[in-house]
Amino acid sequence: MSARALRGTSPFVALYRACFLQRRRSVRRRLRLLATHLIGEAQSLQRLQLRYAVLYLGLLLFSAVMGVSGLYLWREAADERDRLATMSREALDMRGSLYRQMKEVFDHAFLGDIGAADEFKSYAQDIDQHFVLVYGQVKRAEELERVDALRAAYDRVRGYGETLLQSTPAMVQAEGASLDLALEQGGFRDFEQELDAFEALLLRDRVRVDRRLSWLQAAVPWLLALPLLLATLIFIVFRRYLRRAVAEPLADIMTATRIISHGRFGHRVPERGAAELVRLSGAINAMAADLAASREALLTAEKQATLSALVPVVAHNIRNPLASIRATAQVIDDDALPDDVREGLEGIIAAADRLDRWTYSLLSYLHPLQPQRVPVTVSTLLDTVSTLAADRIEARGIQLRRVGWEEGGSTELDPQLMEQALLGLLNNAIEASPPGAEIILRHACAGGEVSLSVRDYGSGMSSAPAPRGLKPVATTKLQGSGLGIPFAAKVCEVHGGRLEFIHHDRGIEAVMVLPMKDPHAVERRTA
């Protein structure tokens, strides 16, 4: 929150808002870190789909495990509660059967009931069945110890009863007081104590089971809510990542395609998001660059076509009056005329010649070049060019040094076009060199290519021309047309080569790199 927003509020409110915003930023930062750890940066959509499927299956498995675990724990606790209740119920039923069994003993002793012995045995069998059920429910050693003690106490009581049933009623009545005391203070008391101890043990276990059930009852809602919370967290994380890695890059791509479709090929798509979208953005940027280059090439071609159609007409309309002007100036020129008049006439003739050469060079540059390749010895070609420029070289006192001519390499090229291109480069070097300087003509063959270079030691150019897109430029040279370098670049291009420039501490070196064989002829032979 800005200071302006905080201004006008109490210090406590401002502090609370600042802490709240800081905490919200911290939560967002942690979510971003979590998304980075879970998903990663610039992942592919396939990997993202795989990770989402793995997380989804993991969430389902986690939910299943939590549900099964909770159900198992609940079922285990319920079964334990039922087991303890069964044992307690059987123990109480056992006590009731024992008292009814002892009642039959007293009926035999004091009432002379002749069926008491059979009833006694029936109740004994019932008590034995209760003990069988109790023993079947025992799981712990402490429980087994209590049940054994209870069984021993019952066996003593049962022994007293069987003894009384075997005695006559008169004998029982005579010893009644002592028998009552033995039952009350002996067997019955032991049985009640063991039964109370057994009930206390069961009660303690029931309290433990009830406590576990209470804990499960409190934990089950959280166990059920945990998968929902995890699903919500995964949804939030993936939603933020999908917005940053898919939705926003797709919006950038749609915006870029709309802008590029309007002809603004310089616009670039930010290369971000998922790996597929990064590649798509790179492809769109490359397409835009290719479209821009194609448009430039198309504009250049259209301009070239327009110039090609217009220049011959202009050249014809210039050269005819120019020839008349030169002829008139040449006829008027006479030794009898004043020096200043003759100097003016010579300037007119020189300007007419220069303009004629310029129009001729322009026509040669704009005319489509169709090289007629023949095998040519490179040293012979350089000798021819040196001979053509010999007068200018001698007039300026320039030293011409040949390097690599003894190799005597040969290649296939159009000798007329190459002579004109090399002559233009050599004339540029002569114009750029001071009187008495040196010019180096170099020839070399390597890697299936032949290189021809012209190096001067003049002031050089402010910057080396680009290897592509050379076009006519204005020139300040007396004999220059501004078309020497573009024409040489065009000749190299139609021969399948290239024109390069190397800056030196003094001067510049123009290098024509040409293939030693005609690549188009190789393609035709292959076809």
Image (cartoon, rainbow, N blue to C red):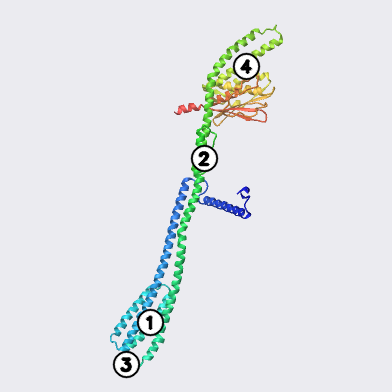
Which residue, given by chain and number where applicable, does mark 2 sit on? 252
Q: Which residue is mark 4?
A: 354
Residue occupying image coordinates x 64% and y 15%: 351
Q: Position of residue 3 (x, y in %)?
A: 63, 48
Work out whether mark 4 precedes mark 2 in sequence or the reverse, and give the earlier one: 2
> At 34% from the left edge and 92% from the top edge, which residue is drawn?
173
- Using the rendered view, name the quadrant where residue 353 is placed: top right
Disc 4 or 3, which lies upstream in sequence? 3
Residue 170 - label: 3
Residue 126: image quadrant is bottom left
Q: In what element is the residue under mark 2? A: helix
Look at 46% across and 56% down and name the residue there: 227
Looking at the rendered structure, the kind of residue marked 3 is Ala
Sequence-earlier tag: 1 or 2: 1
Q: Amino acid at mark 1?
A: Tyr
| Alpha carbon distance from label 1 to label 2 | 90 Å
